[in-house]
């Protein structure tokens, strides 16, 4: 059950009569029920709120009694998927006692009186927040501190006199405790805080002037998306979203239909023929439209789930790589000898790119939570690049804005490029185009991000389970730590061995053979990366370590396949299975979830590489790669079944058993 609390303390507007004749606080209570709250309580003071929070076992919604808003605003706050604790942030000028907010990358990084934020406030607290279960003790502590009129963390002698609504003091205290809070902005809908009958009347008129359902449908489209998606998909995809909702389709069903379209497109690309290629291009485009619709449908119906978010991330990558397989097969069938080689290069490049994208995003989020750490180097090129990037991002709709969003080769542009080139020129040209643009985008983003990261100097991997996200196995954990060199330098050096082996194997394909010692030598170089497993990952560029490790493992697997004359489609399949494993880790990182249940059975990057090397040395590289790939796929499927079916069902049965026995169900 979701508990909602209307906090009336310090809000004279609570007793103001609304258009319907009921008091504003009572109308808010009714709106909270319609927004999904199963229980709504009115709290006269912060002490009473703290007692209610102490007994809560589910997320808690808290609103002041001076908020006039569409019910959808409260529903969006209650169901927001961005994080466990979310605060409503408005652009209204702050009223008396209202808490100003400074926001970076969707996170509240400062809250308090406007003058205390040194003119850097980006909004004002909207008088409503949702607090996750893990943050409820902090909420109760903040409530009691605010009730005693002692700011959290301040000595009693420094306490200012009571001022402003209690909900503002509560939120400022919660932020003062360092609770990670995400900002929920109001767009297209209406939300205002009122203090008198005139303000109430104006706010009610503004609410009545907006069609709530139409606004929600528009809000289902991302506020900022890439060029192709914005102008060639989002212009009509909301109609598909509306139709899907009327048909009763859920986001997961739309995701699976999108997967089917992409698989059908890949089959047509492999079949060849002008008509098949054109039909495949159309299916690929429609599949991408549905890929956008599943997210829009989730936002429109507010049907969010951890499973849906994970599935969407995994399906996006699986669809793209199945299409690469279709292009590789089609190019080979058309007579090009290295069609599969291009597909393998494309999947490797995109996976390493995605790893850097993920960790660079984590770097920025961590930097936003540590604003004082940014810019400590005193300016320089990193400072200038950061300022230039912020200016371009703020200039929404300009040529520079769209160029910046397009040059990085996002998913919409990739699918558009594939669809156009395969229909006009065929699979071979399509693969070359993807690789060419991908390499340029990787070079561009890699160079700029490296410079900006050196300027920010924010450690990232040390804030998470580095062993998990490095994907270290038992062998790497046993190796001694070579701390003076640094984990990134070790990972980069380690990737050079497999790269050299691959180049040697490709250059000696016609009759010649790679020396027997080459595979174990490359393996030894690769294992150098394990010397960084036990070291701290606090360097400004150590966020690149996971990508470097993925590159090293992929290159080694490909090199072993080439040396062992493994069929290229099998090499692609093995790399594809590896990407499923690694994207599972990044999806869990983005959704703040724990390790996969069977992660220990994946052997680690070094364990898998050792097994491949042994298979190649004894002359069974193909059998070894097929066996290991099948094993990893079974482990992946088993882990998915455990994480999303078996364990949740077991937890649900345990919860029902506790409730049936008269106990309290766990939060």
Image: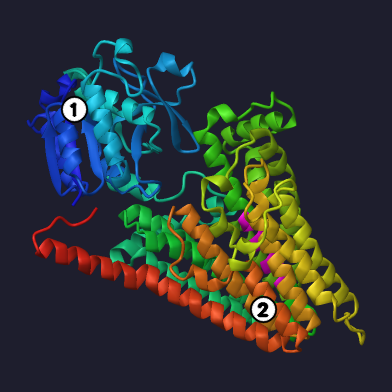
> Which mark, by number, is residue 251?
none
- Assess whether residue 346 is covered by the magenta stretch: yes
- In magenta, the rendered stretch is 344-355
Q: What is the x, y in percent for residue 325?
A: 65, 77
Q: Nearer the viewer, residue 519 or 271?
A: 519
Does the magenta run of residues contain 411?
A: no
- Vertical placement of 241 versus 184: above or below? below
Q: Quadrant of residue 149?
A: top left
For mark 2, what is the residue?
611
Viewer-proximal residue among 201 and 342:
342
Dot 2 lies on which element?
helix
Q: Is residue 155 left or right of residue 314?
A: left
> Can the viewer see residue 256 in this picture?
yes
Among numbered discs 1 and 2, the one appearing first in the sequence: 1
Residue designated by label 1: 46
In the depicted structure, whether residue 582 falls above or below residue 271: above
């Amino acid at each position: 059950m979701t508990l909602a609390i209307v906090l009336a303390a310090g809000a004279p507007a609570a007793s103001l009569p609304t258009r319907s004749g009921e008091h504003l606080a009572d109308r808010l209570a009714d709106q909270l029920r319609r927004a999904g709250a199963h229980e709504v309580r009115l709290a006269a003071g912060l002490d009473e709120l703290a007692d209610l929070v102490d007994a809560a076992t589910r997320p808690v919604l808290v609103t002041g009694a001076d908020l006039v808003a569409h019910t959808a605003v409260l529903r969006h706050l209650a169901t927001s998927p961005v994080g466990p604790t979310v605060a409503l942030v408005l652009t209204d000028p702050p009223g008396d006692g209202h808490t100003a907010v400074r926001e970076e990358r969707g996170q509240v990084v400062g809250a308090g009186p406007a003058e205390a934020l040194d003119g850097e406030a980006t909004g004002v607290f909207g008088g409503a927040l949702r607090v996750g279960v893990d943050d409820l003790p902090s909420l109760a502590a903040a409530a009691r501190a605010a009730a005693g009129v002692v700011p959290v963390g301040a000595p009693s002698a420094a306490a200012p006199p009571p001022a402003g609504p209690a909900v503002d003091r509560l939120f400022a205290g919660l932020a003062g405790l360092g609770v990670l809070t995400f900002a929920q902005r109001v767009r297209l809908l209406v939300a205002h805080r009122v203090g008198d009958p005139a303000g109430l009347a104006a706010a009610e008129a503004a609410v009545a002037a907006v069609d709530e359902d139409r606004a929600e449908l528009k809000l289902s489209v991302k506020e900022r998306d890439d060029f192709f998606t914005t102008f060639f998909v989002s212009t009509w995809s909301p109609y598909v979203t509306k139709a899907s909702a009327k048909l009763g389709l859920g986001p997961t069903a739309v995701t699976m239909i999108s997967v089917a379209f992409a698989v059908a497109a890949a089959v047509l690309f492999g079949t060849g023929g002008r008509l098949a290629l054109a039909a495949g291009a159309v299916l690929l485009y429609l599949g991408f439209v549905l890929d956008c619709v599943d997210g829009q449908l989730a936002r429109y119906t507010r049907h969010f789930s951890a499973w849906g978010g994970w599935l969407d991330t995994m399906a996006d990558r699986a669809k793209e790589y199945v299409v690469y397989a279709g292009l590789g097969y089609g190019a080979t069938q058309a007579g090009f000898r290295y069609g599969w080689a291009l597909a393998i290069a494309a999947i490797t490049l995109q996976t390493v790119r995605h790893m850097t994208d993920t960790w660079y995003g984590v770097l920025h989020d961590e930097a936003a939570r540590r604003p004082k750490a940014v810019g400590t180097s005193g300016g320089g090129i990193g400072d200038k690049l950061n300022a230039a990037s912020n200016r371009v991002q703020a200039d929404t709709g300009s040529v520079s804005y769209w160029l910046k969003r397009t040059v990085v080769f996002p998913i919409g542009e990739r699918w558009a490029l594939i669809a156009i080139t395969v229909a006009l020129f065929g699979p071979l040209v399509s693969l070359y185009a993807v690789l060419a643009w991908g390499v340029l985008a990787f070079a561009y983003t890699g160079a700029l991000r490296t410079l900006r990261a050196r300027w920010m100097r924010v450690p990232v991997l040390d804030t998470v389970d580095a062993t998990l996200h490095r994907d270290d196995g038992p062998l790497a954990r046993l190796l001694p730590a070579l701390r003076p060199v640094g984990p990134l330098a070790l990972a980069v050096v380690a990737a050079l061995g497999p790269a050299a082996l691959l180049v040697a194997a490709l250059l000696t394909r016609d009759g010649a053979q790679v020396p027997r010692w080459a595979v174990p030598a490359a393996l030894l170089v690769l294992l150098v990366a394990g010397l960084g497993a036990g070291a701290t990952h606090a360097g400004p560029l150590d966020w690149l370590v996971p990508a470097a490790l993925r590159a090293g493992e992929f290159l080694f697997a490909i090199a072993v396949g080439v040396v062992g004359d493994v069929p290229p489609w099998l090499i692609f399949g093995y790399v594809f299975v590896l990407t499923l494993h690694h994207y599972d880790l990044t999806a869990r990182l983005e959704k703040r979830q724990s390790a996969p249940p069977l992660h220990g059975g994946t052997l680690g990057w070094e364990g898998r590489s050792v097994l491949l090397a042994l298979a190649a040395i004894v002359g069974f590289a193909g059998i070894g790669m097929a066996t290991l790939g099948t094993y990893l796929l079974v482990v992946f499927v088993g882990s998915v079944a455990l994480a999303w079916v078996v364990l949740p069902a077991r937890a649900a049965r345990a919860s029902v058993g506790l409730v049936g026995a008269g106990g309290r169900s766990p939060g």
